[in-house]
Amino acid sequence: MARIIKKELLNENVSRLTVDAPHIARAARPGQFVVIIPREDAERIPLTIADADVAKGTITIIFQIVGATTTVLDSLPEGAEIAHLLGPLGTPSHIAKLGTVVVIGGGVGIAEIYPAVKAHKAIGNEVITIIGARNKELLIYEKELTAYSSRLVVTTDDGSAGRKGFVSDELKDIIASGKKIAEVVAVGPVPMMRVCCETTKPHGIKTVVSLNPLMLDATGMCGVCRVTVGGQIKFACVEGPEFDGHQVDFAELTARLKGYKDVEKQAHDHVCRLLKGLEK
Amino acid sequence: MAEKKKRLHMQERTAAERVRDFQEVPLGYTPEEAMAEAKRCIQCKNPLCVKGCPVEVKIPEFIKLVAEGKFAEASRKIKETNALPAVCGRVCPQEEQCELKCILGVKGEPVAIGTLERFVADWEREHGKQEPRRSAAGSRVAVVGSGPAGLTCAGDLARLGYQVTIFESLHVTGGVLTYGIPEFRLPKKIVDLEVEYVKTLGVEVKTDMLIGNVYTIEELLKDYKAVFIGSGAGLPKFMGIPGENLDGVYSANEYLFRVNMMKAWKFPESLTPVKIGKRVAVVGGGNVAMDAARVSLRLGAAEVTILYRRTQEEMPARIEEIKRAREEGIVFKILTLPVAYHAAEKGWVKEAECLQMELGEPDASGRRRPVAIPHSEFRLPVDTVIVAIGNSPNPLIPMRTPALKTEKWGGVIVTAEGLTSLPSVYAGGDIVRGAATVISAMGDGKRAAKAIDRLLSPVKQ
């Protein structure tokens, strides 16, 4: 059980929870995640730890309301207990003093890059942050990220804020400007991460991606999160979720993410009926 | 001496009835049947059966009490050495252990020790009194994992007066007893009650605690005088053949985890789904393969096929489980090796490409090596493939504990008493052995508990 201390809506689809979990806050490192079971009958879902406050004993998680279990999670008010919270999981990001690091976040991935941006800044790297969303309303964390970035660039698909276009357009321009980049970190939807990797590969710029395959136990037992990296099977829950993006088989990852799409609606409809009180 | 009667076999539900639900297959003994079977035991002065039991259950003594109708006393006698009798009575391979050594087995059938143990545990559950919860004041010991090894080690240490905390990574206790073995072979209610019993001995259980990540072993040693690692063989093996990462190809762990742990059989009331389609192929010949196949039937698969590269003779599964799987209509394609899987347009598996095998010369395991017959390829239409070819020791704790020595294949290296390469850190069960049996894990837990007691209470010895 873990109590929700604070709940905020960042936009119509994304919520931020501050949760009481001192043992997780103490051990959490950038790049790690938790598994949440909001209610006993719900799924185990992996969510990135977006921040940890050791003094207060809390962690922050940010999630998009996309399916049945995130809908259940979003139905819990401040003060409510999350049935199960497990973490920190996965292998932490490798943070080293490198020079200039470009950190890219797309969609809800914008919030997920916050720990990496903070850590790269703290170790003395120059951090250029690029964040992208479909439109202005969906942009999150601009203020928080600005505080730790040497430069923050916003892109939107429709041009309603910042540069019109994709995060990869800005990345291309930075590379073209001749700026020496030591590492790129890209976190967001699979197509975004794939395009970022395709952009950096010809220039030999190391690019780290945080993968989001399906997970069940998320402790290395079931293998549903297996991804092919450099021709080898890796379990993203334990060996990841971060990998060298130039080695990742994105086509396989995309296919494996679709495996259960058709039944998700069934679960979502069930939860919506339940929450409306039409069923017991 | 009275003539020894034939062994009484448990009644079982018919195959047609049982494949429609997840309830248990055998029905257990009535008290009359149990007393009759117990009277077959000749009460050897030097009982060999006990030597066949990794947890040293006082077999002739408890059976004598059953024969006299003293079921509560029989239960106490078993629990002197075994905290999980209802589990052992169901899933131990008695035919290879206690019953293999039974002297009656030389000329006829051995005493049904496992069934009697099961009867006593079930009788106790229905009629016994709840024991008051004990509290302990001795040294603190941490146990990692609430599977059979961890529960046994924790229970034994608590009985010796230690303050024991179990750290379980999942949200439910029981380890493989919960996520691995299906309801119809080991009801979860029984596992829960066995865990409750261990709690009444004074053991504290913390779920959602992944040791290695939340606390390292070194950190645990600051708060606990000793640590027992029983983190199991959670890492599923794959064959590394083309198409193994297609949608619809599951590890047995994933498949059974969805069904047993997450209750996917009642989706969408339980929000974790499982998709199997009509034609299921299960790769492997062990108990887990039988479990996955029989679960598939119960989830509504029309045709379930076991693919095994050797013959039924070499299958590691218990004969009893193979028999039940056959009765229920599982198709056995022996001498068959999958070499690739092919997908339909949307990326879901559609066919298993297989080779026909024949048996050649014996290999290192002493079993005849399967050899492919040239040009014997054929394709089997499938909607689901479940890979049940075994598990390796869970690598997480070794990964996070560099000083902990392991074998090349991942098993944690221990001494005869279960001590690892780290002082005060013990290990047992599948993390040491690779995928083995529930009872061998319990034996390891018991052995480590004794060693930890010697370590922490040298004065008593």
Image (cartoon, coloured by chain):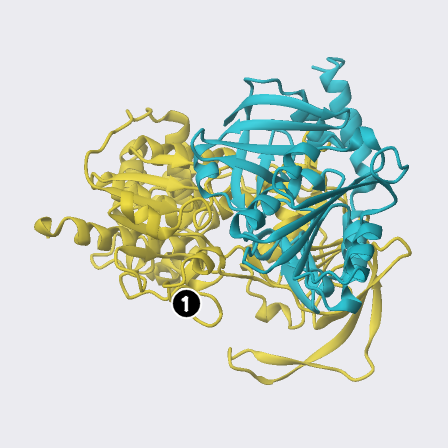
Chain colours: A cyan, B yellow
Write down the chain letter for disc 1: B
Q: Which residue appears at 44% of the width and 58% of the height?
A: B430
Q: Position of residue B394 (x, y in %)?
A: 49, 57
Q: Position of residue B371 (x, y in %)?
A: 68, 82
Q: Which residue appears at 20% of the width and 38% of the height?
A: B161
State left or right for residue B166 relative to residue A137.
left
| Mark 1, other Cα within 10 Å: few <14 / some 14–19 / many ≥20 | some
Q: Residue furthest left?
A: B459
Residue located beneath label 1 in the image: B406
Q: Position of residue B191 (x, y in %)?
A: 46, 38
Count of numbered badges drawn on the protein:
1
Q: Residue furthest bottom?
A: B361
Asked if residue B139 is positioned above or below residue A91 in the image, the reply reads: above
Q: Which residue appears at 56% of the width and 37% of the height?
A: A51
Asked if residue B307 is positioned above or below residue A29 in the image, the reply reads: below
State left or right for residue B371 relative to residue B128.
right
Q: Which residue appears at 33% of the width and 39% of the height?
A: B165
Front residue of B376 and A139: A139
* Tag 1 secondary structure: loop
Q: Position of residue A86 (x, y in %)?
A: 52, 38
Residue B273 shows up from this direction: yes
Front residue of A161 and B218: A161
The amino acid type of the residue labelled 1 equals Thr
Front residue of B309 and B457: B457
Residue B57 shows up from this direction: no
State left or right for residue B420 relative to residue B323.
left
